[in-house]
Structure formats: structure tokens, C-alpha cells
Image: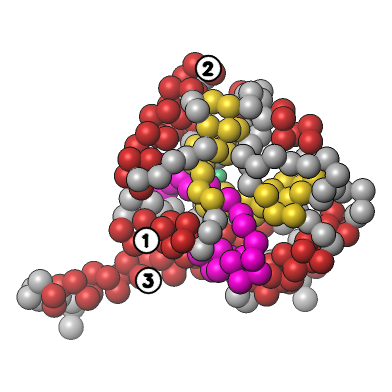
Amino acid sequence: MSTNRVEYLFDYFTLTNYKSLLELALEKGFCFIVFTDNFLADRKDILWRHDVEFSPDIALKMAQIEHDLGVKATYFFQIHSEFYNIFDCYFSDILKKIKLLGHEVGLHFDAHYYGVKTENELTRFIELDKNYFEQVFDCHLSVFSFHNTNSFILKCEDYEYGGLVNVYSKYFKERFRYCADSTGYWRYEVLDELLKDSSVRHLQVLTHDAMWSTEVLSPRKRVMKSIQDNADRIKRQYDDLLPMLGAKNIDDE
Ligand SMILES: [Zn+2]
């Protein structure tokens, strides 16, 4: 077994264990709420969040697992992603399926795309993305998360920008402990330890789709596999399309 496999808990990040973690949260009495719900001081509340970075396909698998357990999460989608185009029919259908499973949808806002440097610009560009997203998907957005934070973004701690609740606002930072699987390992605290800790009564959990896989893989291989799976799907789509158009699909042989 490689050292990294032990040190970075590769075996932890399977979809089977993902389900076990949700079951553990339920067993420990956590109530799954969304960002616009009122949290209750005398209740154990958990905000379960997904920043969809690489693979809406895997996000859908997670959404199904949560639905089967009767749990509600919030899925934040990008509209400027290098990894998926949410306005492609294939991915738009996935977003709709996730909503139909009863989950909330939010905007995973990319301030870097616009080179945002002030809070005024932040408000303007969130409004721009929000309006387009809402009109395309005929939905109402109420919450956003930042994609790839930097020192400026970390200082944007207001409760709301551009009409959307900010999950990184001081409000949530002061009231909820935080746990994230960013880049495929627990940077600060391990999720199941927090779930088992009876002093933790309000917790925000951030998970990322491709950081979880069916088989045990390194974080890099989990991401590479999700990219390859998507590329294979697009290649099949091309091969299937040409006969439908009555066109020849000419190769070397
Ligand atoms: Zn992100």
C-alpha cells in the first residue's frame, strides 16, 4: 500500500463510504437544512453543500444517494467551468434531475472569470450570472458560493451579494464549524470525527463530486477518470451522430 494511500486516506473517498458518512450524520442526530432555513440553536443542524467542479454525472450519483436516505443538500453549479458546460443539454438535464430529487441549486460563482476587484463589481457580476441562470433554467436562485477563493474574496463576508446569500459570509463562519474535502483530502478536520464530536452542533460540509469514486484511487486519478469518462461520452456522441446525419465517419482504416 503506498504511503500516500495511507496518509491521504484514499480508501475513505469512495461513494460507498460517502453513503456511510451521511448515515453517520443521521445517526448522530443532525438535521439537514439549507442555507435559507433558520438554524436552531438547540438543534444539531448540518448544511451539506456540493461545489460541482468536474463531473455533474458524479454529483447526480451523490444526489441519488442522499435522496434515498431522505437527506437534502445544496448543489452549486458553475457557468464558466473548464470541465463542463451546464448549458449543454446533457448537463442541463442532470441539473434538472438533481432538483427533481428534492435538492437545492445554487450558483458557484467564479470571480476570477470577471477579474472582480471590488464589492461593487462582485454585486454586478453575481446579478449578471444569477439572472441568466434563472432565466435559462426557469428557477429562482437564493444562494451562491465562491469558486477558488483568494485574499480579496475571503474578505467579502457580507451575508448577501447581488441578491444571493453568501455561504462564506461571517454569518455562517461564526455559527457553523466547517469541513471540506477540497482537492481530495480533509485539509483540517476529518468529517466523521466532527460528526462523532458531541460538541459540534452546527456544521457546514463541503464536498466535491469527482473527489469521490466507485473504486479506490488517488485524488488526481479520481479527477483524471472523471475527465476521461466525459471525453469518452463525447466521442461516442460524435460516432453516433454521423450515421444519424447520413454522413460517413472516415478513419484511417
Ligand atoms: Zn469551485
- Residue 160 seen from this side: yes
Q: Which residue is labeled 2 in the image?
A: 118
User: As drawn, which residue projects farthest toward the bottom?
Assistant: 253
Q: Secondary structure at mark 2?
A: loop
The range drawn in magenta is 59-82
Res 63 quadrant in image:
bottom right
Q: Is residue 220 magenta?
A: no
Q: Please name which of the two marks, 1 or 3, marks the residue nearer to the observer.
A: 1
Q: CA distance from mark 1 to mark 3?
A: 19 Å
Q: Secondary structure at mark 3?
A: helix
Residue 213 image offset from top left, x and y in percent: 60, 70
Q: Is residue 23 left or right of residue 120?
A: right
- Residue 183 seen from this side: no
Q: Classify 220 as above or below 37.
A: below
Q: Nearer the viewer, residue 249 or 199?
A: 199
Look at the image and tell me in which quarter the N terminus lies: bottom right
- Label of residue 145 in the image: none
Q: Please name which of the two marks, 1 or 2, marks the residue nearer to the observer.
A: 1
Q: Which residue is labeled 1 in the image?
A: 93
Render colour scheme: secondary structure
Beta carbon at label 3 within 8 Å of ligand 1: no
Classify 10 Å Cα crowding around label 2: few (below 14), some (14-19), many (20 and above).
few
Q: Nearer the viewer, residue 250 or 177?
A: 177
Q: Quadrant of ligand 1?
A: top right
Q: Classify 134 as above or below 207.
A: above
Asked if the residue at tag 3 contacts the one at tag 2, i.e. Cβ–Cβ closer than 8 Å, the answer is no
Classify 10 Å Cα crowding around label 3: few (below 14), some (14-19), many (20 and above).
few
The amino acid pointed to by label 3 is: Asp
Q: Secondary structure at mark 1?
A: helix
